[in-house]
Amino acid sequence: MGARTLEGKVALITGGSSGIGAACAQALAGEGARVVVGYHRGRERAEALAAQLPGNGHATMAIALEDTQAHAQLADWATREMGRLDILVNSAGYTRRIAHHDLDAMDGALFNEILAANVGGPFSVIRALLPLLHASGDGLVVNISSVSAFTGLGSNIAYCAAKAALDTLAISLARAFGPQVRFLNVSPAAVDTEFVKGRSREELQKKAAQTPLGRVVLPEDVARAVLACATHLRTATGTRIVIDGGHTL
């Protein structure tokens, strides 16, 4: 059996206990990475996932996006416990289903809360972990973005705005911190997870049927794209990888 492509690497995944994050953990561990499964409230899920990942040396860590002061402590912990960091996957986020015309429901406080969760939190985590990623010499940050960033269609207008900001953030950081660290955003259409409460499987299938490929995007599809960013797309940085089944065509 040949060497796995990520042998010796360490990957940290925010929102890693379920959905897209969990699929990313499985994909990266499958290629030999030691994985830190970051979680917010899903400690038991994170620990169960880490225990069944292939390979050894995996860990779990509580990572609350809104607690920016704790992100410096996260960097200290990663240095002490893992010894290095090569890959950061920002998969954690938050949204709420609100019709775009309902500006009464989308007040200023909620707008700012959604921006803080989906772009402010990832920025803070990147900022704290950047010295470790830079020291790797081959660092990679993959943000889980969305086609909502450039279609303006999504669970609410704040979520669309946050993902657009996340895309631009990757461009700015890629320019500033290459070649030691690359920054990429993976942008799926609606994924078959429980991320958007109230969205049914039937709704996803109906939308997918109208796309050229005619199938729902799965967490594993997103994870394979993240894995490709680490293993194959070696000259890509500051751009988005769209995996939407042709949804935006």
Image: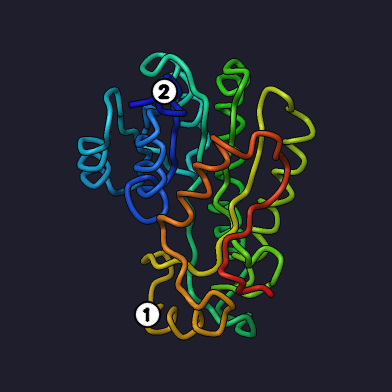
Q: Is residue 133 visible?
A: yes
- Mark number for residue 7? 2
Q: CA distance from mark 1 to mark 2?
A: 38 Å
* Residue 55 placement: quadrant: top left
From the viewer's perspective, is 19 left or right of 91? left
* Residue 175 placement: quadrant: top right
Between 155 and 111, the one nearer to me in the picture: 155
Q: Which kind of residue does numbered mark 2 sit on?
A: Glu
- What is the total number of numbered labels drawn onto the structure image? 2
Q: In the rendering, at what x and y percent does residue 64 appear?
A: 43, 42
Q: Dot 1: within a 10 Å radius of its alpha carbon, few (fewer than 14), some, or many (20 or more) residues?
A: few
Instruction: Say whether disc 1 or disc 2 marks the residue closer to the N-terminus.
Output: 2
Query: Residue 66, relative to residue 147: is it above or below?
Result: above
State which mark lies toward you, 1 or 2: 2
Secondary element at image label 2:
loop
Q: In the rendering, at what x and y percent does residue 153 appear?
A: 63, 75
Quickly name the residue at label 1.
200
Between 80 and 190, the one nearer to me in the picture: 190
Secondary element at image label 1:
loop
From the viewer's perspective, is 134 left or right of 203? right
Q: Dot 2: within a 10 Å radius of its alpha carbon, few (fewer than 14), some, or many (20 or more) residues?
A: some
Instruction: Residue at 36% x, 66% y: name it.
Output: 194
What is the residue that sits farthest to the front in this orientation? 1
